[in-house]
Amino acid sequence: EVQLVESGGGLVQAGGSLRLSCAASGFTFENYAMSWFRQAPGKEREGVLCISRSGTILYYADSVKGRFAISRDVAKNTVYLQMNSLKPEDTAVYYCAAGRFCSYRGGSYDYWGQGTQVTVSS
C-alpha cells in the first residue's frame, strides 16, 4: 500500500526554523521525483520545491529561495524540507507528493501525503 506520511510541523515564531519529513513506502522511491506543496486556508495549493530523480532542485516559489531547502535520503525513503527564517505568510498545510517528473502542477503527481500544519506567529 502506497503511503506518504509528513511530520515535523508545528507552531513557531517568525524567524524560527522547522524541518519537515516525508516518509515514503509502497513504491520504488528512487524512481520518483518528490515535491513539497502548501495550502493556506481559503487559498489555492502552491508548489514550493521539488527534487528530481537525478537530484536536480527546482524552486516553484521565489518567496522561499534562500530560506527553504529540499533534500532526499534514498536509504531511508524519506524527503525533507528544511525551513529557515520563517515568516507568517509561510503558514499553511504542507504536503509532499511523488511523481515521475518535477512539475508545478499538482495533477502531475501520483501520490500525496496527508499534510502537516505549519503555523508561524508574528
Image (spheres, rainbow, N blue to C red):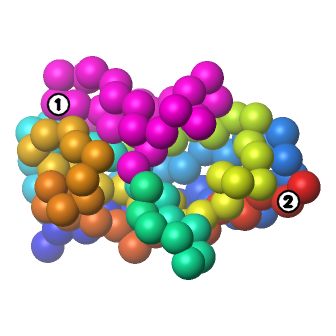
Q: Closer to us: mark 2 or mark 1?
A: 2
Residue type at mark 2 is: Ser
Relative to 61, 85 lies left or right: right
What is the x, y in percent for residue 49?
A: 40, 39
**Vertical comparison of 46 with 75: above or below:** below
Q: CA distance from mark 2 to mark 1?
A: 35 Å
Q: Point out the residue furthest to the bottom here.
A: 42
N-term-proximal mark, 2 vs 1:
1
Q: Quadrant of residue 95?
A: bottom left
Quarter of the image where one finds residue 50 = top left
Q: Position of residue 104 (x, y in %)?
A: 29, 46
Q: Say the numbered circle drawn on residue 53.
A: 1
Q: Which mark is residue 121?
A: 2
Closer-to-camera residue (98/28) = 98
Q: Are marks 2 and 1 in contact (CB under 8 Å)?
A: no
Answer left or right for 50 relative to 121. Answer: left
Residue 21 appears at what percent x and percent y? 48, 50
40 relative position to 50: left or right: right
Is 28 on the left or on the right of 105, as rendered?
left
Which residue type does callout 1 highlight?
Arg
Q: Residue at x 66, y 52 (%)?
A: 90
Point out the stretch of residues depicted in magenta.
47-76
**In x, y percent, where is residue 39?**
50, 65
